[in-house]
Image: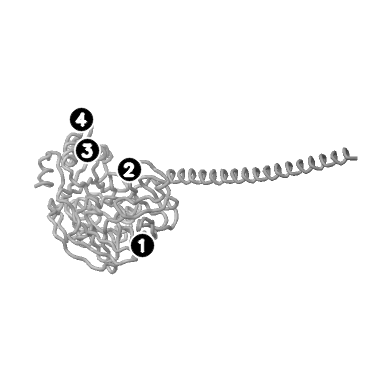
């Protein structure tokens, strides 16, 4: 019996020990499993954070470019107190130039807009490879400084809204229109209503501006030693190359017709070394294009639009304007060489001029055939929708002149680089 009782005690003790051991092991295993689950969850969270950061970095890099475009209406930001604060709004499809970022990282989520204190969020833009007009950088600023009111709108050159800013801006005037000032902001030319100016003041400047500018006129260029034209308005390849090289070497600003009109109206100031290159008629005019592109010069072709297709003269350096659609014919009228624009029926002339404008993408610039004009023809040119017209005259273009009698200097085959130099630098 004694042995039996001892045996029972041993069995009971053993069972108790086993129970305690199993319980301890279970608790340990449970706790260990919980710890492992927590570790796994932490790893998962860290992996998600890492993946999110990697995705964000990829998106930042994908959206950054020297030039971008807004993909929706969004905000403009300014860095204040180490934070990016909303300072304005910007419309969709607005092109912006950005500051260079050498090594893009996660701290570059806000792209700095070139030459400004403002930023755009990476999510709000896409890469853009279009360009926009930067010719305003060639103009001479007016001696006028303005301060804007706060929370006002800024517009493009067609007066469509671009963005608003809550900031007051201080800027110099680049373009002076009747109701708007043009200023350099966000690295582009923008316009602000004069009613949104808080104050303005005149400033002192020593920069010289052009009081007058020159327009020159070429006709036909003959390449590769082609001597088939001995007329005084036929130009050799060598003559054109030497003239254009001179203009390029001397950093002469070659103008558009629109810039000439703005100069006449006093809306812009131009550097003293400025010139308008024009070409009349269209015969062999495509031969000027390689020289314009070689030297990076702008010119305007006054094309008789029924003679040649516009596509023949495609170049970013060549503006196409009107020389009538089909009225460049002698002997029609009893004035001078007899261009029809001075005596034909009003409806005939208007139909011709409107056809020319439509053919030439709505050009606003016109040139009278044979330099011949009258009050009758000028009034019809205005009625047809042209804003300006060119003649001959061999005089300089001055501010305030009649924009329908803009003079030009015809260039003859015998004129050397010295003649061009005197016109531009004299």
Classify 12 as above or below 71: above
Q: Which mark is residue 164?
A: 1
Q: Is residue 82 above or below residue 128?
A: below
Q: Position of residue 340 (x, y in %)?
A: 25, 54
Residue at 34% over, 66% down = 151
Tell me if mark 3 has few (under 14), some (14-19) or many (20+) residues whose alpha carbon lies within 10 angstroms of its own.
Answer: many
Q: Which residue is mark 3?
A: 221
Quick check: marks 4 and 2 in contact, CB under 8 Å?
no
Residue assigned mark 4: 225
Tell whether label 4 touches label 1 (CB within 8 Å).
Answer: no
Q: Is residue 34 above or below residue 335?
A: above
Say the numbered circle drawn on residue 123: none
Task: Of the two numbered discs 1 and 2 on the same chain, state the one appearing first in sequence.
Answer: 1
Q: Nearer the viewer, mark 1 or mark 4?
A: 1
Q: Is there CB contact under 8 Å for labels 2 and 3?
A: no
Of tags 4 and 2, which is closer to the observer? 2
Q: Secondary structure at mark 2?
A: loop
């Amino acid at each position: 019996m004694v042995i039996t009782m001892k045996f029972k005690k041993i069995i009971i003790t053993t069972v108790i020990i086993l129970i305690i051991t199993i319980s301890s092991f279970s608790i340990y295993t449970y706790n260990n499993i919980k710890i492992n689950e927590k570790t796994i969850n932490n790893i998962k969270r860290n992996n998600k954070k890492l993946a999110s950061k990697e995705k964000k970095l990829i998106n930042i890099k994908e959206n950054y470019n020297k030039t971008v475009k807004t993909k929706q209406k969004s905000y403009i930001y300014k860095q204040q107190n180490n934070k990016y604060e909303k300072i304005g709004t910007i419309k969709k499809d607005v092109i912006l130039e950005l500051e260079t970022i050498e090594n893009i990282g996660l701290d570059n989520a806000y792209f700095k807009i070139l030459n400004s204190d403002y930023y755009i969020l990476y999510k709000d833009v896409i890469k853009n490879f279009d360009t926009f007009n930067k010719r305003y950088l060639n103009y001479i600023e007016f001696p006028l400084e303005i301060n804007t009111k706060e929370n006002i709108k800024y517009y493009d050159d067609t007066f469509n809204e671009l963005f608003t800013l809550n900031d007051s801006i201080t800027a110099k005037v680049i373009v002076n229109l009747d109701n708007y000032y043009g200023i350099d902001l966000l690295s582009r030319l923008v316009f602000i209503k004069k009613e949104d100016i808080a104050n303005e003041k005149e400033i002192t400047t020593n920069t010289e501006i052009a009081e007058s500018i020159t327009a020159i006129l070429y006709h036909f260029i003959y390449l590769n030693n082609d001597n088939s034209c001995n007329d005084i308005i036929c130009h050799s390849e060598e003559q054109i190359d030497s003239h254009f090289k001179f203009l390029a070497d001397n950093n002469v600003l070659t103008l558009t017709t629109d810039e000439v009109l703005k100069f006449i109206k006093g809306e812009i100031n131009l550097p003293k070394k400025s010139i308008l290159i024009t070409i009349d008629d269209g015969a062999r005019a495509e031969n000027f294009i390689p020289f314009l592109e070689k030297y990076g010069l702008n010119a305007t072709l006054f094309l008789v639009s029924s003679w040649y297709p516009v596509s023949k003269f495609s170049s970013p350096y060549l503006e196409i304007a009107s020389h009538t659609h089909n009225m460049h014919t002698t002997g029609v009228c009893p004035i001078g060489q007899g261009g029809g624009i001075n005596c034909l029926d009003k409806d005939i002339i208007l139909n011709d001029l409107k056809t020319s404008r439509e053919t030439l993408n709505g050009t606003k610039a016109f040139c009278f055939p044979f330099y011949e004009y009258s009050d009758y023809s000028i009034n019809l040119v205005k009625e047809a929708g042209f804003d300006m017209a060119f003649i001959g005259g061999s005089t300089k273009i001055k501010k305030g002149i009649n924009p329908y009698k803009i003079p030009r200097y015809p260039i003859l085959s015998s004129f050397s680089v010295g003649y061009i130099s005197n016109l531009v630098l004299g």
